[in-house]
Image (tube, rainbow, N blue to C red):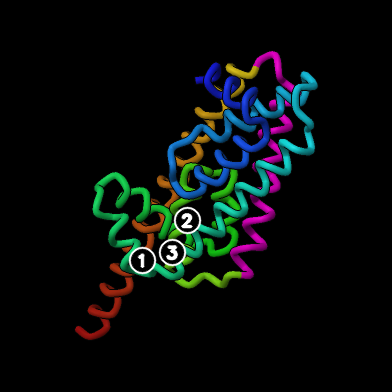
Amino acid sequence: MTDAVFALLSTYGPWVVFASAFLSCLAVPIPTSLMMLAGGAFAAAGDLALTNVVSAAFAGAVIGDQTGYSLGRYGGRDMLDRLARSPARKAVLTRAQGFTDRHGGKGVFLSTWAVAPLGPWVNFAAGATGLNWLRFTIWDILGETIWVTLYVGLGYGFAARIESLASLLGNLAGFLVAAVVAAGMFAWIRAVLRAQTRQNGANARVE
């Protein structure tokens, strides 16, 4: 995988970083984090300009997020229903919707870097559920700034250990997504228990 990413960067430079970031924000399975790490490593070696790599990654991510939001906004509930026809997509979309409902703009911010695998689905859900565009955009830009700076910066600083770093960050991202899902389940169970307690109290007063 790393060799293929290096080959693409050698041939197309920042353009492939832009395309990778854009497509990954639309749920296309592309190793964009590895691409940005590699872009940073190329910049450290002097093969690419660091500003070009950062600009390409940031522009691709923000435009991709805006496209996902617009698809959700104009596709509405029908689009989410079509996406949810696959059991795997339905599961991740349900988590993304819950995450957006609970956290709003802050959820968009976290989905761009802390729980990046949920990011594309949060974009769709935010648009379809009517999250304010300006609010979405502000939090999205803040989040993508962190994502791009983090990955390109790490690639630049640890160019000699790029493969080990990519593996470590991939494992960390998986852990964070699992933690978010677990937290969501805990919150749902607690809400159900509270509702049941209130219902029991109301029944006791009636009796």
Residues drawn in magenta: 134-161
Instruction: Describe the element under mark 3 as helix, strand or loop.
Output: helix
Determine whether, in the image, residue 54 is placed left or right of residue 113: right
Name the amino acid type tagged 1: Arg
Most common secondary structure along the magenta stretch: helix
Nearer the viewer's eye, disc 1 or disc 3?
A: 3
Pick whichever, 173 or 41, lies toward us.
41
- Density class for disc 2 (Cα within 10 Å; few <14, some 14-19, many ≥20) is many
Q: Position of residue 50 (x, y in %)?
A: 78, 33
Name the amino acid type tagged 3: Gly
Q: Earlier in the sequence, mark 1 or mark 3?
A: 3
Nearer the viewer's eye, disc 1 or disc 2?
A: 2
Instruction: Describe the element under mark 1 as helix, strand or loop.
Output: helix
Q: Earlier in the sequence, mark 2 or mark 3?
A: 3
Q: Is residue 193 visible?
A: no
Name the amino acid type tagged 2: Val
Q: Residue at x 29, y 62 (%)?
A: 81
Q: Which mark is residue 122?
A: 2
